[in-house]
Image (tube, grey):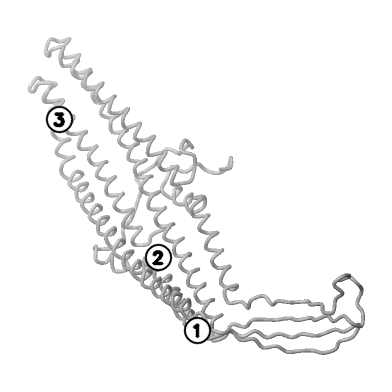
Amino acid sequence: MTATEPVPGHSLESIRAWVLEHNPELRAMDFEAQAAEARIQPAGALPDPTASLGFRGLDPDKPWRSAGADRQVDYALRQRFPLWGKRGLARTAASQDAVAVGLDRITAARDLLAEAEAAYVRYWHADQAVAVLDRRIALLRQVEEIAGVRYALGRAAQQDAIRAQVEQTSLQRERIERLATKQEAAATLNAVLGRRSDAPLATPGEAPHLAVHSASLAEALDDADAHPAVRSQQARAEAARTNVVLQRRNRFPDITLGVGAMQLGNGLESTELMLEVEIPFQQRARRERERESRLLEDAALARRDATLRAVEESGASAWSQWTSARERRALIENTLLPQADATWQSALASYQVGEVDFGTLLEALNEWQGADLARVDALRDELLGAAAVRAIEGEIR
């Protein structure tokens, strides 16, 4: 990271941009995709020709003697030509493999972005949980002051103020645990970003927004077969099928053409034209290679089906998590929080005039702030589910 490069962490967009630009795994897969594309043209290229140079009529005692009338030099150039469309099939198979590698890169980008979004949500949630605890501790200090005033006036027991102090100490312990959770979330987030685990992160801003575009689980899974992981396995199956055809074509022999010349002394004595044909003698080896190619095709198709089922299972699980957390958050925000707030306000007013005891006031405060913390927890679960659903939908921007 350069000195002028912004520190990620303030927003979800900064996290997404950093993953796409700096994650080392994605950079490695970019290079692998380019390497796969570079293999396409050579796959269908002609083999390199061979050249030979032969000497005849040499003196065994003096093979290094200068050329003479009695020494013959043979020159030959040979080129093998694969026939029956083998070069085109090899190039097609390489192209299909390159497509699979490119789709693997897209799959990795989706998965890494989903991981980064989930890590950022946990990082943001830990910060929000600490903020809720800080508000709760501040309210307890106010309650302690009220209890102290009532004790000074002889309207309450000293135990009320001490109990408020004990509750603050308990919350301070929980705050320390939440801060440790935040550090762990920051380390996880840095790992996904490809940074040092102790690299600085900006303080998270507002709650991350992760929109789910599907209206139902069925709609979210409609395009599961278009998921890049599934399409990657399909491309590999197509490459395997092409290789099956190629292995069958290998039953037919290739030819080698050659030209040559014979030099005797300082002049050419003769020229020659050669035609060589392979003899398909090793039939058992060819049959085994054909069998191997068919089995690899079957394996690729089975792996495609397994990947499709895994995508659908992941989508269904993520959708369930997202919907249940969303309903839980809505219930807390719309019902539980207003009720708990009203209970707290009523208990506070009643305690100030001595109508309720301190235990009732403290219970109302814990219920109110506990509901706020439960809201933050539910929002975290909702966002985690949304990130997983978006990975199935294909939202990688």
User: What residue would you read off at disc 3?
Assistant: 364
Which three-letter amino acid code belongs to the residue tagged 2?
Answer: Pro
Q: Which mark is residue 66?
A: none
Give whichever of discs 1 and 3 has the lower sequence position.
Answer: 1
* Secondary structure found at label 3: helix
Q: Position of residue 13 (x, y in %)?
A: 43, 50
**Residue extending furthest toward the front:** 61
**Residue extending furthest toward the left:** 355
Q: Nearer the viewer, mark 2 or mark 1?
A: 1
Q: Nearer the viewer, mark 1 or mark 3?
A: 1
Which three-letter amino acid code belongs to the residue tagged 3?
Answer: Ala
Q: Which mark is residue 228?
A: 2
Residue at screen point 39% across, 73% down = 297
User: What residue would you read off at disc 1?
Assistant: 251
Residue at screen point 24% across, 37% down = 373
Q: Residue 43's quadrant in the figure?
A: bottom right
Inter-mark Cα distance, 2 to 1: 35 Å
